[in-house]
Image (cartoon, rainbow, N blue to C red):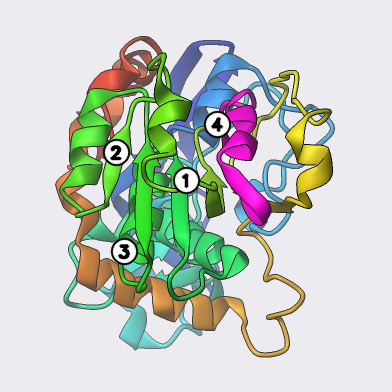
């Protein structure tokens, strides 16, 4: 049996390769992919060749433990249906809709332990948002917002919008977002945030004082641009927290730590979804966090943020769009029907 898999082969180059699937093992299942989501953050670093070569693609995901080097099959938001099961696998898996942390591929064979059953109330495309929602849940947990705080979120891509949507459920004094693209600011305002601002505006920092005169208690940096850390630090009040959810790869920027930051006791928090924060790990595990993420997807229904759908054969066009016209996009999905 053949399948098609998307490979990153060089900076700004992707290609489909036909591969032969291995024989189905007795303890394995065959999944045919229905849709997969493109990460506009991590995947675009791979697309641009701006990833650290010494790192594994993702040490926490069995299917992504190859090193970051071309050619690389990469992606981690795959939804499909179980079509065949091995003779030792429970027949209840057959025809089940499942999520998998798999690269963009038309079909794959895996062990059922690597699959996450999708609740019946969710569509396949909504389920594609599971990794981003788990990330948003992790970001909120790491930031630990407190009743009455003023919170700022830089970046309103899919992860930023999900994070803002979760934060909106807290009794905050103010929730302000920022993004350089008008489409994303307009979408953010539909989540009933206090305001959504253009960080490239000349009066941006002055505008922030109208929502938090002394600065924000909690600030999230989710843009993928390391230079935005300067705006995040400048927006944070004395003893506030900055949660850094972006992965910058090989991107570099000069960070201003010699001014107000030095005397402000601002806490910089690295937040990454592959692990549970140590202070929570005695009570939380991945299964519990996934359960919270599924419930949040049911409430928020982020499928409405899919701006573009491309077939697997059109994948190169999808990445060109994200590279050349990101202002037109929020979430881009690859379809397989």
Q: Which residue corresponds to mark 4?
A: 224
Numbered disc 4: secondary structure: loop
- Choose the circle earlier in sequence order: 3 or 2: 3
From the viewer's side, name the closer residue of 107 and 290: 290
Q: Residues within 10 Å of mark 4 (few under 14, many from 20)?
A: many
Give the label, 1 or 4, closer to the camera. Answer: 1
Give the label, 4 or 2, closer to the camera. Answer: 2
Picture disc at residue 168: 3
Up the image or down, 299 lies above or below 13; here it is below
Q: Are marks 1 and 2 in contact (CB under 8 Å)?
A: no
Numbered disc 2: secondary structure: strand
In whole angstroms, how far apart are the C-alphas of marks 1 and 3? 20 Å
Q: Which residue corresponds to mark 2?
A: 196
86 left or right, relative to 217: left
Q: Which residue corresponds to mark 1?
A: 213
From the viewer's side, name the closer residue of 270 and 322: 270
Occupied quadrant, residue 317:
top left
Examine the rendering and report whether any part of residue 24 can be seen. no
In whole angstroms, how far apart are the C-alphas of marks 1 and 2? 17 Å
Occupied quadrant, residue 37:
top left
Up the image or down, 235 lies above or below 269; here it is above
Q: Which residues are magenta?
A: 225-245
Give the label, 3 or 4, closer to the camera. Answer: 3
Up the image or down, 94 lies above or below 214; here it is below
- Residue 115 image offset from top left, x and y in percent: 46, 69
- Residue 245 image offset from top left, x and y in percent: 59, 47
In whole angstroms, how far apart are the C-alphas of marks 3 and 2? 13 Å
- Residue 202 image offset from top left, x and y in percent: 41, 14
**Magenta stretch contains residue 303:** no
Q: Residue at x 65, y 90 (%)?
A: 283
């Amino acid at each position: 049996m053949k399948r098609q898999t998307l490979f990153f082969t060089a900076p700004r180059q992707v290609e489909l390769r036909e591969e032969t699937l291995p024989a189905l093992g007795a303890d394995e299942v065959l999944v045919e992919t229905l849709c997969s989501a493109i990460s506009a953050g991590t995947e675009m670093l791979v697309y641009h060749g701006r990833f650290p070569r010494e790192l594994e693609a993702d040490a926490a995901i069995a299917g992504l433990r190859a090193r970051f080097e071309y050619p690389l099959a990469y992606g981690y938001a795959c939804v499909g249906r179980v079509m065949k099961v091995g003779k030792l696998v429970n027949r209840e898996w057959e025809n089940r809709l499942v999520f998998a942390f798999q690269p963009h591929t038309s079909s794959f064979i895996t062990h059922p332990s690597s699959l996450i059953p999708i609740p019946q109330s969710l569509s396949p495309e909504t389920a594609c948002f599971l990794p981003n929602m788990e990330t948003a849940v992790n970001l909120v947990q790491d930031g630990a917002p407190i009743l009455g705080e003023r919170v700022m979120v830089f970046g309103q891509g899919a992860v930023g919008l999900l994070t803002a949507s979760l934060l909106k459920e807290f009794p905050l004094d103010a929730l302000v977002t920022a993004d350089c693209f008008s489409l994303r600011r307009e979408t953010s305002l539909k989540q009933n945030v206090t305001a959504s601002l253009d960080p490239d505006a000349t009066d941006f920092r002055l505008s922030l004082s109208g929502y938090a005169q002394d600065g924000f208690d909690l600030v999230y940096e989710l843009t993928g641009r390391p230079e935005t850390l300067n705006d995040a630090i400048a927006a944070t009040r004395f003893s506030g927290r900055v949660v850094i959810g972006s992965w910058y790869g090989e991107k570099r920027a000069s960070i201003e730590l010699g001014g107000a930051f030095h005397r402000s006791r601002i806490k910089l928090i690295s937040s990454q979804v592959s692990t549970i924060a140590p202070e929570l790990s005695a009570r939380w595990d991945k299964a519990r966090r996934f359960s919270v993420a599924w419930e949040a997807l049911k409430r928020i229904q982020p499928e409405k943020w899919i701006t573009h759908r491309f077939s697997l054969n059109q994948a190169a066009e999808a990445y060109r769009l994200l590279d050349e016209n990101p202002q037109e996009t929020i979430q881009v999905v690859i379809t397989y029907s």
